[in-house]
Image (tube, rainbow, N blue to C red):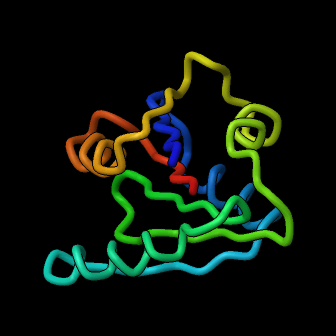
Amino acid sequence: MTNYIITKWIEPYVLLENAKKNYQMKDYTFDGFNKLNVKKDFLKGINSPSTFGLYMKNVNKFYLFNSDTSIDVEKFLKDTVGLSDGDFYTTDNRDEPFDKIDLGKAEAAFLAA
């Protein structure tokens, strides 16, 4: 699994609206009491190359996107959102995106299968 952590400030709606234009979306709303259970359900949905998840700072939702074809998240970030290599980094650590966002050290993360 590769996760893309965005460190450059970006408007959350820019990420969300660009993804919604291109892929089918489902959202998972959480609060302080049910976040871990909702997160487990969300992560179960990221199960193929045609799905990815989005988690953003200061938004109490996880977003799951899917397509009929394989999704190239890096290409989406660069070509559709307009980010460059220095605006995000990748990690295989599944906890790091959540930790960085919850600590305010990242703006958003895309989680891919």
Does residue 9 sit above or below 37 in this rendering?
Answer: above
Left or right, 88 with reference to 92: right
The answer to whether 19 is drawn above or below residue 96 in the figure is below
Q: Residue furthest top?
A: 86
Q: Quadrant of residue 41?
A: bottom left
Which residue is depicted at the point 63% across and 19% down?
85
Judged left or right of residue 67, residue 34 is left
Name the residue located 46 percent from the left edge and 46 percent from the top edge: 108
User: Residue 16 location in percent, x, y?
Assistant: 63, 59
Drawn side of residue 55 relative to residue 2, left or right: left
Point 49% across, 35% down: residue: 6
Relative image position of residue 10 (x, y in whole percent) = 54, 38
Would you say 47 lies left or right of 67 here?
left
Q: Residue at x 44, y 69 (%)?
A: 62
Quarter of the image with the C terminus is: bottom right
Q: Nearer the viewer, residue 102 or 49?
A: 49
Nearer the observer, 71 or 7: 71
Give residue 107's position: percent from left, percent from top.
42, 41
Q: Nearer the viewer, residue 47 or 55?
A: 47
Rendering coords of residue 48 (x, y %): 65, 65
Question: Residue lying furthest left in this view?
Answer: 33
User: How many numbered marks does the figure carry?
Assistant: 0
Q: Is residue 76 above or below residue 60?
A: above
